[in-house]
Image (spheres, grey):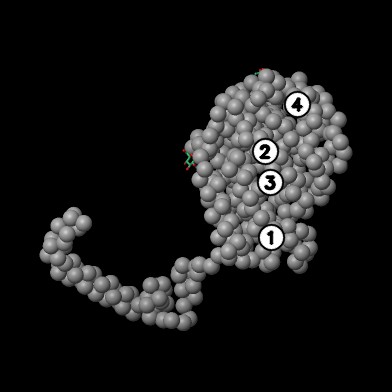
């Protein structure tokens, strides 16, 4: 109080000079605008705003967008999410990485994963969602690690349901701090230590997310998703994520955005739009609730360079040191939009501000490549930069 009272007399003395400066400033601004409007009648947006209330096309994009009032559900959901995200991340010696395998049945690369996990007991846990057949195991780390599963239909919400089932089972163990989703065709590309440090000490989650304005991106947005999911927020990305615990919790906590995808994202819901739940739900959700908390790319490599409906499958004869060296040295990711001939953009893979190789895992590998991958494993995982 004292300080404010003391400063008041001084302020009163300065008031007249300030006032006159303001008058001069406002007067000059108006004069400039009048002259501007006179000299460039249709070009200046400021002039347009000042002197015409109609017929100004530029006016709508010049004004800030109107802010939509959130529904009760949206307010509740945003409050819960913000609270979870603000909880501190604690990485300890006992912190584990949850490896969550989404597979129809037997995992063909268990023996390779066994080699990868060996000697790192206590630093990882395995969960298997086998949607069709009971898996036959070839590694002790996978025995009795199946969770209760259900049918998974590609592109449908049942895929997301399976991911959520894996997450909720893995979240039951409080030591799990990082959650990686993998498929039966995935293989490790790095040593366990390299992978562990890369993921545990990264300040972002690896959720793939990009803006595709084309028919296979924003073109799949459904009007039914409005108003909670605006078309401009609709995003695309590969489903194979790796996320920190807080992000796994908000994924489980979300029912608002999830239900929009459950009810309206499917093939042919609106005018033959082919919405594929697993390509859009998490990218859109994270873009909306924590855009700076994700890397926007995934640590699982896949080769789309053949530009076919499915990515390239690596066969036994493809497996050689040079191929693995090539994949593990990639340090930027490309994106191709589905507009026209496809616009390509490249992004560097940044890890806590440093440019580093992007990939820790790879897909799609043919089961026939197992022996060769095992032979080469110590060769291709030895580089530790
Ligand atoms: C990911 O993209 C969002 C915009 O969509 C951006 O705000 C964020 O910084 C990006 N993340 C990183 C790690 O660059
Ligand atoms: C590895 O990358 C080089 C350079 O891009 C390319 O010429 C070569 O064909 C690649 N080798 C394999 C096995 O993919
Ligand atoms: C992650 O670290 C980088 C580099 O230090 C920094 O620019 C970025 O803001 C950080 N991101 C988050 C989500 O903390
Ligand atoms: C891996 O194999 C390649 C080809 O056989 C060889 O040139 C290279 O030295 C090996 N690297 C390591 C680290 O053993």
Residue receiving disc 1: 260
The tag on residue 238 is: 3
Which residue is under mark 2?
172
**In the depicted view, which residue is nearer to us: 285 or 249?**
249
Q: Secondary structure at mark 3?
A: loop
For marks 1 and 3, the one nearer the N-term is 3
Furthest residue toward right: 133
CA separation, marks 2 and 1?
26 Å
Q: Of circles 2 and 3, which is in front?
A: 2
Dot 4 falls on a residue whose secondary structure is: helix
Among all residues in the image, which is located at the extreme front?
1
| Mark toward the start of the polypeptide (2 vs 3) | 2
Task: Report, in whole angstroms, how far the alpha carbon at label 4 lies from the one at label 1.
Answer: 37 Å
- Please determine whether, in this image, residue 27 is positioned above or below residue 258: below
Look at the numbered disc 1 and say if its residue's Cβ is closer than 8 Å to ligand 1: no
Q: Nearer the viewer, mark 1 or mark 3?
A: 1
Which residue, given by chain and number where applicable, does mark 4 sit on? 141
**Marked residue nearer the N-terminal end (4 or 1):** 4
Q: Nearer the viewer, residue 136 or 287?
A: 136
Q: CA distance from mark 4 to mark 2?
A: 18 Å
């Amino acid at each position: 109080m004292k300080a404010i009272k003391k400063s008041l007399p001084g302020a009163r003395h300065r008031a007249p000079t300030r006032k006159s400066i303001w008058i001069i400033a406002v007067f000059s601004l108006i004069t400039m605008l009048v002259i501007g409007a006179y000299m460039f009648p249709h070009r200046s947006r400021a002039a347009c705003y000042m002197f015409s209330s109609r017929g100004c096309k530029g006016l709508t994009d010049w004004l800030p967008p109107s802010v939509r009032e959130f529904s009760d559900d949206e307010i509740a959901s945003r409050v819960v999410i913000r609270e979870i995200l603000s909880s501190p991340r604690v990485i300890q010696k006992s912190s584990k990485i949850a490896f969550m395998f989404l597979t129809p049945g037997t995992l063909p690369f268990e023996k390779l994963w066994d080699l990868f996990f060996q000697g790192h007991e206590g630093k990882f846990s395995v969960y298997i969602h086998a949607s069709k057949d009971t898996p036959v195991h070839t590694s002790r780390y996978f025995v009795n690690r199946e969770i209760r599963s259900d049918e998974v239909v590609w592109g449908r919400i049942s895929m997301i349901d399976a991911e959520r089932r894996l997450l909720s089972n893995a979240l039951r163990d409080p030591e799990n701090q990082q959650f990686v989703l993998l498929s039966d065709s995935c293989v490790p590309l790095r040593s366990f230590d390299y992978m562990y440090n890369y993921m545990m000490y990264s300040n972002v989650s690896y959720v793939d997310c990009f803006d595709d304005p084309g028919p296979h991106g924003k073109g799949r947005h459904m009007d039914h998703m409005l108003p909670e999911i605006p078309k401009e927020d609709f995003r695309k990305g590969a489903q194979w994520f790796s996320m920190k615990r807080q992000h796994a919790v908000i994924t489980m906590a979300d029912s608002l955005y999830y239900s929009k995808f459950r009810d309206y994202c499917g093939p042919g819901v609106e005018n033959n739009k082919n919405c594929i739940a697993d390509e859009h739900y998490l990218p859109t959700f994270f873009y909306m609730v924590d855009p700076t908390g994700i890397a926007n790319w995934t640590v699982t490599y896949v080769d789309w360079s053949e530009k076919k409906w499915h990515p390239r499958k690596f066969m036994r004869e493809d497996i050689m040191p040079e191929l693995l060296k090539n994949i593990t040295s990639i340090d930027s990711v490309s994106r191709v939009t589905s507009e026209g001939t496809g616009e390509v953009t490249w992004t560097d893979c940044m890890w806590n501000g440093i440019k580093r190789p992007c990939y820790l895992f790879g897909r799609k590998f043919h089961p026939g490549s197992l022996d060769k991958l095992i032979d080469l494993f110590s060769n291709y995982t030895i580089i530790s930069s």
